[in-house]
Amino acid sequence: MAFSSIFPDVGIDLGTANTLIHVKHRGVVVNEPSVASTNTKTGTVVAVGDDAKKMLGRTPAHISVTRPLVGGVISDFDMTQEMLRMFLKRARGSSLFGFRRAVVAIPDNLTEVERKSVEDAVLAAGSAKAYLIESPVAAALGAGLPIDSPTASLVVDIGGGTTDISVISLGGTVVSKTLRVAGDKLNDDIVKFAREEFKLAIGESSAEAAKILVGSAIPLDDSLETTLRGRDIATGLPREVSIRNTHVRAALNKSLRTIAEAIREVIESTPPELVGDMVHQGIVLCGGGAMLRGLDDLIAAETGVSAKVASEPLTCVIRGLGQIVDDMEGHAALLDNPLKPISITL
C-alpha cells in the first residue's frame, strides 16, 4: 500500500460560514457549517456542523452555540481546533492514521499572527504539515481561470464573513482587497430592516432564507414574495409579515454598493496592462454571495467590466484546493509564496 494512501494529503476550506474538506483522490468528503455547540457545565463539545447549526436559537441555558470564525479569522482557537479535529475525523473515516499535508485556504489580508493561528489549529487537529494559500487563488483555480499565464484574472470571492477581491497573474495575487462585508452582513441588513420597517424581531436563519428566496441586487421582472416569522417588538407575541423582493433589495443596497465600490478601487489600482486583460477576461464571482440574483449585472454596471458567476460558485475554493492536493508537486509554486500582495485599505 502506497504511503500517500495511508497518510493522504487534504485540502481545507476553513470558511466563516462553511468548512469543506477534500481528501486526495477521494474528493470532497466534508461540507458542513462552521458551527460548534458546547456544554458550558462540562466544557465538552456537543456537536459540530449541521447538527450544531440546527441548535441555533433553540438551546437551553447550559448549551452554547458559536461560530468560532468571524470575518475569516479564528476568534475562538480552542473551539476551532476541536471543530476541525471532528471534521478531520469524519474525513478520515475508518482509517487509524492522520493526514500528511494540509492545504488551507485563507483570506488575503490576514496578519502573520492570524495566519499562524490557522496553521496551529490545523496542525493541532491532526495534520503533520500545513500550507496556507489565499482563497481567491484557490477559487480562480477551481473556476478554471488561467492563473499561471501572464494575464489578469479578477476574482471576487463573496463568502460568509469576508469578500476577497483579487487580481491574479502568473500564479500570484497582484492587487487585493478584503472587506468584512459579505453573506453574514447581508443577513444582518435584513434583520435590521425587518426591525425598523416591520417592528419585527427575526433570527439570522430567517433573514438568510428571505435573502435566498426573494433577494436580488437589481429590480426583477417578476415580483417575489415570502413570509417572515418572528416576534412583534411592541407586544412580544409571535407575528408574521409578507416581505417582497423590493424590500430585500432596499435592505441590501448599501452593502452591495460597498462591494461594487471596492471592486472599482481594485481595478483602479491595477497596472494598466493587466486592466486591458480584465476587459477581455471579465470579473468572475464565486462564493455563496455570488448566487444573489442580478449581482453580476449590478457589478458590471458599476464597474464597466463584464461580470459572470462561476460554475458552482459555492465550491470554487475547495475545487481549487482539490486540484492542488491531488497534484502537490505540480502546484508547488502556489504553496511557496511568502510575499504578500499589494493590499488596499479602506
Image (cartoon, grey):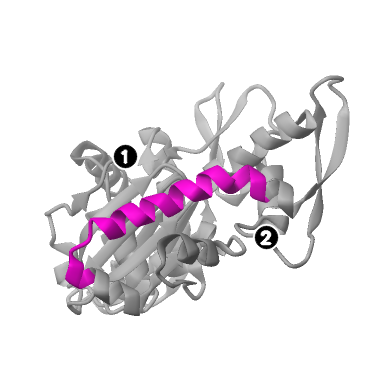
Residue that badge 1 annotates: 346
Q: Residues within 10 Å of mark 1 (few under 14, many from 20)?
A: few
Q: Secondary structure at mark 2?
A: loop
Amino acid, disc 2: Pro
Image position, residue 258 (x, y; %): 45, 46
Amino acid, disc 1: Leu
The structure residue drawn at horizontal position 21% and vertical position 37%, both measured from the top left corner, is 113
Residue that badge 2 annotates: 219
The structure residue drawn at horizontal position 12% and vertical position 54%, both measured from the top left corner, is 338
Examine the rendered structure and indicate whether residue 262 appears above or below residue 40.
Answer: below
Image position, residue 150 (x, y; %): 17, 77
The structure residue drawn at horizontal position 37% and vertical position 38%, both measured from the top left corner, is 74
- Left or right: where 343 falls relative to 46: left
Quadrant location of the N terminus?
A: bottom left
Q: Check whether the beta carbons of the residues at disc 2 and disc 1 lie within 8 A of each other.
A: no
Q: Residues within 10 Å of mark 2 (few under 14, many from 20)?
A: few
Residue 48 visible: no
Mark 2 or mark 1: whose residue is earlier in sequence: 2
* Numbered disc in front, either 2 or 1: 2
Q: Secondary structure at mark 1?
A: loop
Q: Is residue 253 magenta?
A: yes
Residue 268, picture quadrant: bottom left
- Left or right: where 161 falls relative to 37: left
Instruction: Estimate the spatial distance between the alpha carbons at disc 2 and disc 1, rounded to whole Å.
Output: 29 Å
- Left or right: where 339 falls relative to 51: left
Numbered badge on residue 109: none
Residue 345 visible: yes
Number of on-image labels: 2
First to last magenta residue range: 249-274
Image position, residue 310 (x, y; %): 47, 73
Quadrant location of the C terminus?
A: top left
